[in-house]
């Protein structure tokens, strides 16, 4: 109860966007990618099988991408001393050309950023970002803001970064 979630209503609104969005990314020049990187899918990296808000956001993104029939690798960021559930099977494969990082940037590992389009899905509750978040943002092609507050903070703090607004609302079921 009370978990931030992309509801069915928003999923169905988002799915045409998701398909068009990722289809348009095929127009980017990926000719410099090595053989291990495949266009046409998404590597979603996040806290998938845990019980807190960022994990629920990751699961909502997975549901939307699956509903849109976008090929998907689900990569779990592991936290020590946290109980995990088994909502989704996860992989260690990073073979697609788009990464969605559904965790805050202070946990960023740049190993899989190279030759990929990188999207950050971040949450923050203050009106200014920590300096380390600002510097890490250089490694992301765009940031998805899930609230109007976050959109405002990201636009103010990261004026040269592409910011896209994605809707969420509280789901009490």
Image (cartoon, rainbow, N blue to C red):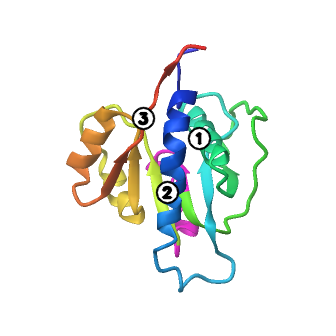
Closer-to-camera residue (89/63): 63
Residue for badge 2: 20
At 29% from the left edge and 33% from the top edge, which residue is drawn?
A: 149
Q: Quadrant of residue 5?
A: top right
Q: Quadrant of the N terminus?
A: top right
Q: Is residue 19 left or right of residue 120?
A: right
- Where residue 118 is drawn, which disc sits there? none
Give the label, 3 or 2, closer to the camera.
2
Q: Residue 105: image x %, image y %?
A: 45, 50
Q: Is residue 17 visible?
A: yes
Position above or below: 27 against 51: below
- Where residue 167 is drawn, which disc sits there? 3
Position above or below: 56 against 47: above
Q: Quadrant of residue 159?
A: bottom left
- Where residue 58 is drawn, which disc sits there? 1
Describe the element under mark 1 as helix, strand or loop: helix
Q: CA distance from mark 3 to mark 2?
A: 17 Å
Q: CA distance from mark 1 to mark 3?
A: 14 Å
Q: CA distance from mark 1 to mark 2?
A: 20 Å
Mark closer to the chain start, 1 or 3: 1
Q: Quadrant of the C terminus?
A: top right
Mark closer to the chain start, 1 or 2: 2
Give the label, 1 or 2, closer to the camera.
2
Q: Residue 156: image x %, image y %?
A: 20, 47
């Amino acid at each position: 109860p009370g978990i931030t979630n992309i509801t069915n209503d928003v999923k169905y609104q988002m799915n045409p966007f998701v398909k068009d969005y990722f289809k348009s990314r095929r127009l980017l020049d990926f000719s410099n990618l090595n053989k291990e990187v495949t266009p046409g899918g998404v590597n979603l990296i996040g806290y998938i099988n845990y019980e807190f808000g960022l994990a629920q956001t990751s699961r909502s993104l997975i549901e939307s991408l699956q509903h849109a029939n976008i090929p998907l690798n689900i990569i779990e960021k592991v936290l020590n001393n946290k109980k995990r559930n088994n909502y989704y099977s996860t992989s260690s494969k990073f073979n697609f050309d788009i990464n969605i990082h559904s965790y805050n940037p202070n946990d960023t590992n740049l190993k899989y950023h190279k030759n990929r389009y990188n999207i950050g899905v971040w949450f923050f509750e203050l009106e200014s970002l920590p300096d380390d978040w600002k510097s890490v943002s250089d490694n992301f092609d765009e940031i998805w803001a899930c609230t109007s507050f976050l959109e405002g903070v990201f636009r103010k703090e990261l004026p040269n970064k592409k910011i896209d607004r994605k809707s969420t609302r509280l789901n009490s079921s």
